[in-house]
Image (spheres, helix red, strand yellow):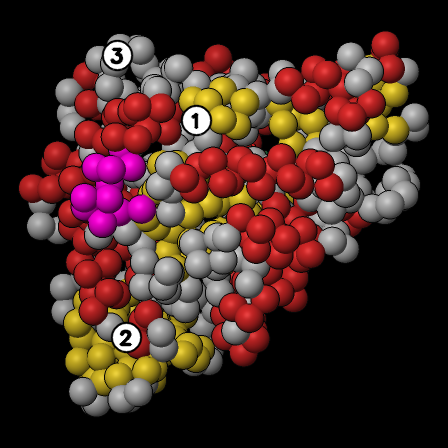
Amino acid sequence: MNFKDKIIYEIYIKSFKDSDGNGVGDIRGITSKLDYLKDLGVDLIWITPFFCSPLKDNGYDISDYYSIDPLFGTMADFKELVSEAEKRSIGIMLDMVFNHTSTEHEWFKRALNKEEKYMNYYIFSDKPTNWVSKFGGGAWKYVENLDRYYLHLFDETQADLNWDNPDVREELKKIIRFWKEIGVKGFRFDVINLISKPEVFEDDLIGDGRRFYSDGKKVNAYLKELIEDTGIADYCTIGEMSSTDLSSCVEYSKAENRELSMVFNFHHLKIDYQDKDKWKLMKPDVKELKDLFSTWQMTMQKENGWNALFWCNHDQPRAVSRFGNDRYFWKRSAKMLAILQYLMRGTPVLYQGEELGQTNAYFSDLSQYRDVESINYYQILIDQGMSQQESLHILSERSRDNGRTQMLWDDSSNNGFSDGKPWIEYVPAIRKANVKDEEMDDDSILNFYKKLIRYRKSRNSLIYGSIDFIETIYDNIFVYTRKFDQEETLVISNFTEKIAEMEIDLKDYKIVLSNMDGMEYKNGILTLREYEAMVLERI
Ligand code: GLC
């Protein structure tokens, strides 16, 4: 499949659309909104996990990879979704959580029962290391009747699989073949660069352990094997990479390696972490962002790798609240973010509600949170001596629940998401965007996304073209060109509220898309207003 010209849209199933009034989004809810997605210009939908799960981590803790959790629907519902999507030329991508299973999975239960075969499916050790779990606390849990510890890089109910065991790899291939049969067109692989653990487990004396298990030695070999043996080299596959580096991402995504179509990396979403710590707030370091974009883009281009382009997902706060200004420049900053990100070299992956300019949840009370990581970290921050108020403030900026509130369909009760009580509330603290209102407003963020997507698809330079960054003296001004044959597109964005005057020769260009009316260009000087962004074509 050619994935370069595609638009991918992530659906966080729990919060997208509830069809049966139980307050939780479901598969039939998605089917009912396919026309909306088609109209937006979406080609592939990545749906977060809906398999049987105790839902400690909202489905990223799978207890049966072959069945659908009744909370989300039935196999018949899923088959209907696949066929309805196909009628609209939309492909479905599933989220494969293969680094770990739920501790409720039959394999793990049998391991606890001392069945040798299944003990080898997981990573048990007599001696734990000092590694820290991504959700806080230690990464090993003691099991009394085995007198051993098992590794869990995430919650203690998510036990890491032992990929060095060929039987495990065969089990995982079977799962892919099963869903492929049903007509799935692609896969997103959860934290896939964590699957190859070291041969010897040792304490990390200078860090939290991640340097020992991220981008491990055999990730490439295991990926190649998985992709080859299941025959999905031509499917759309995205690998989520945790604490990765650029050269590993090149290897995972370069076409000739036949591993993944593209990769998610998160470096650009850590520019507001102080000392690389998610729980320490800092203003975004715009210069760093600019450096990251150009380094990653230029290297991926040179080495034939491919990026997934994104700002938002179900693990991130909303970009417009985080990098834009959702109070005073809501529409303008949301549109700037879209122009800057989605015209670079790579495949755009939008996240539900982003196209509406949906903002953070701005919860003020701990009881409003649902996410295991947020709840754990609240306690960790308090234990570190922080006040309740400070801890809640950090959560309101950093919690994953910011991105997990319900999709806003209209202005009826529960925003048209559900007839029942939603599993997570949405308090319209600042801005109440919704699909219905935005569809009727020519100047809305939604209509802008539609225009931008249509435009991207109409330009070879934006799909297949090369990218080049143009130096400016301002950290907040991002300028790049995309070129293919004779076609050239120029993209200019002001990432902040700082107004800048830039010398640039635009006489051979015409403006085709912008988040403002007109442009201020006189005597070779372009004045870029707060969050102004524009797209120009060489005539
Ligand atoms: C990924 C998922 C996240 C999940 C974690 C563990 O980062 O996106 O939601 O909690 O993996 O599976």
- In the rendered structure, which amino acid carries the disc numbered 3? Gly
- Residue 87 lies in quadrant: top left
Question: If you read the primary sequence from the N terminus, does the residue marked by circle 1 or circle 2 appear first?
Answer: 1
Rendered-image quarter of ligand 1: top right
Find residue 21 and name its label. Answer: 3
Q: Nearer the viewer, residue 259 or 204?
A: 259
Q: Is 224 placed above or below 483 here? A: above
Q: Is residue 354 left or right of residue 454?
A: right
Residue visible at 34% across and 19% down in the picture: 73
Could you give the CA–CA distance between mark 1 and mark 2, rounded to whole angstroms?
36 Å
Q: Is 112 placed above or below 349 here? A: above
- In the rendered structure, which amino acid carries the disc numbered 2? Asn
Is label 2's Cβ within 8 Å of ligand 1?
no
- In the rendered structure, which amino acid carries the disc numbered 1? Phe
Residue 82 belongs to magenta span: yes
Q: Are marks 1 and 3 in contact (CB under 8 Å)?
A: no
Which residue, given by chain and number where applicable, does mark 1 sit on? Answer: 50
Q: Which contiguous range is marked in magenta?
A: 81-91
